[in-house]
Image: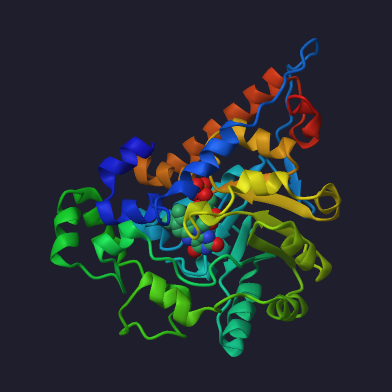
């Protein structure tokens, strides 16, 4: 699907999707460290029937994989956010809508009422934050995910080279790239230029900016524990923190009463020297894995990866690019196909390992445990 996506999506959008920060070593480390997790199979048991379901915050999902928030979703493929959310609803997996998404949050809540979670980049302005939270609550989202790993907007080589400016505007260089991708171009013309529609009432669409500058100016330069405490008191639903890598940080937010944490290095897009998500997951103390719902993303590409993470204590995994490749590479049916591939791989991996239930996979399957 990634190969097909590369043929259908203009270079600048593909670079935005695929790129990491710096030399992209963090990006590679996510994969390498996952590949190094060795599981030891247990045979001599009947594995005819496998239960792949996964319970998160009192709701049963069909699989232990969900869709990570990806900003500017409709720039990778027109209507991507519609396709991702409605397929997640049909296939019963979680879908996290980004603050910087390009579809009104109310539309997504209608398309995926049971499975959509809202990801919050925390605005500096408290009044704006409160207004946004009220909208999210009114729309019916039950899970709020605060992303804390963008204290400053990242300057990624590939994006700088392409000169991606917001609101999106076709420069001669970008026009050339678009000309080579007619299906993307026609669909984008039909469905409209991607824009941060959920922030429309708070920002001036006339201000052009590089993405990194916009993120730094509008959102908090470092989400503090005080602000998380404030959000905890305002938000009655489930609260998850995304982007933590250090055990002490996880401990601190658990003390504030958050319900879960997504261990993540933002797909290697923020700090090239950051530990891989899977190595950070390994370092989370057992008591925290018992006290809160630990999840992870960054680098997950196969069902085997999801089972590996589960063995290391992650209740569930998320992926951004895997599903975006599905929709960009195949179109309307691409997300369903990606989910089916994950389902098949999880099932076969569990059968091969001799574990009939995803939810009981644990560290005893790690080789040498
Ligand atoms: C193009 C792109 C945009 C992203 N936008 C957001 C975002 O708006 N909010 C957020 O919390 N994380 C964002 N992320 C990070 C993802 O939520 C997730 O952590 C990461 O994509 C997982 O790694 P994977 O894509 O390799 O599976 C983005 C990632 C990518 C690749």
Q: Which picture quadrant has residue 213?
A: bottom left
In which quadrant of the rendered image does the C terminus lie? top right
The vertical placement of 49 against 106, above or below, is: above
Closer to the camera, 85 or 172? 172
Residue 73, x across and y down, in percent: 42, 59
Q: Which picture quadrant has residue 43?
A: top right
Closer to the camera, 363 or 92? 363
**Residue 128 shows up from this direction:** yes
Residue 200, x across and y down, in percent: 43, 80
Q: How many marks?
A: 0
Which residue is drawn at the image coordinates 43% and 66% (left, top)?
154
Residue positioned most to the top: 44
Residue 355, x across and y down, in percent: 76, 24
Left or right of 224 on screen, residue 200: left
Which residue is drawn at the image coordinates 74% and 57% (left, top)?
247
Which residue is drawn at the image coordinates 52% and 78% (left, top)?
219
**Residue 81 shows up from this direction:** no
Left or right of 278 on screen, residue 13: left
Residue 354, x across and y down, in percent: 75, 19
Closer to the camera, 335 or 27? 27
The vertical placement of 240 against 83, above or below, is: below
In which quadrant of the rendered image does the N terminus lie? top left
Left or right of 78 on screen, residue 107: right
Residue positioned most to the front: 273
């Amino acid at each position: 699907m990634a190969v097909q996506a590369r043929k259908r999506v203009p270079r600048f959008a593909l670079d935005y999707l695929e790129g990491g920060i710096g030399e992209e070593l963090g990006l590679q480390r996510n994969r390498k460290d996952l590949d190094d997790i060795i599981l030891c199979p247990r045979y001599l048991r009947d594995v005819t029937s496998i239960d792949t379901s996964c319970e998160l915050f009192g709701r049963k999902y069909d699989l232990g994989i969900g869709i990570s928030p990806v900003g500017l979703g409709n720039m990778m493929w027109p209507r991507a956010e519609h396709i991702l959310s409605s397929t997640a609803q049909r296939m019963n997996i979680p879908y996290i809508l980004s603050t910087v998404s390009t579809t009104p949050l109310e539309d997504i809540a209608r398309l995926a009422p049971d499975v959509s979670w809202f990801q919050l980049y925390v605005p500096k302005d408290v009044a704006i934050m409160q207004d946004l939270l009220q909208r999210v609550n009114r729309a019916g989202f039950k899970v709020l995910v605060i992303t804390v790993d963008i204290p400053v907007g990242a300057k990624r080589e590939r994006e700088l080279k392409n000169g991606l400016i917001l609101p999106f505007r076709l420069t001669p260089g970008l026009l050339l790239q678009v000309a080579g991708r007619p299906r993307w171009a026609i669909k984008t013309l039909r469905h409209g230029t991607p824009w941060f529609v959920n922030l429309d009432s708070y920002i001036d669409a006339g201000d052009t900016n590089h993405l990194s500058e916009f993120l730094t100016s509008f959102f908090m330069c470092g989400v503090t524990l005080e602000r998380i405490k404030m959000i905890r008191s305002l938000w009655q639903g489930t609260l998850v923190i995304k982007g933590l890598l250090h055990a002490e940080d996880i401990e601190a937010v658990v003390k504030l009463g958050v319900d879960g944490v997504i261990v993540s290095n933002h797909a290697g897009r923020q700090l090239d020297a950051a530990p891989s998500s899977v190595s950070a997951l390994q370092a989370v103390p057992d008591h925290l894995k018992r006290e809160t719902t630990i999840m992870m993303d960054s680098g997950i590409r196969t069902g085997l990866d999801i089972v590996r993470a589960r063995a290391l204590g992650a209740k569930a995994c998320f992926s951004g690019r895997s599903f975006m490749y599905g929709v960009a590479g195949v179109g309307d049916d691409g997300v369903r196909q990606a989910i089916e591939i994950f389902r098949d791989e999880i099932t076969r991996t569990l059968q091969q390992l001799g574990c009939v239930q995803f939810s009981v996979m644990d560290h005893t399957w790690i080789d040498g445990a």
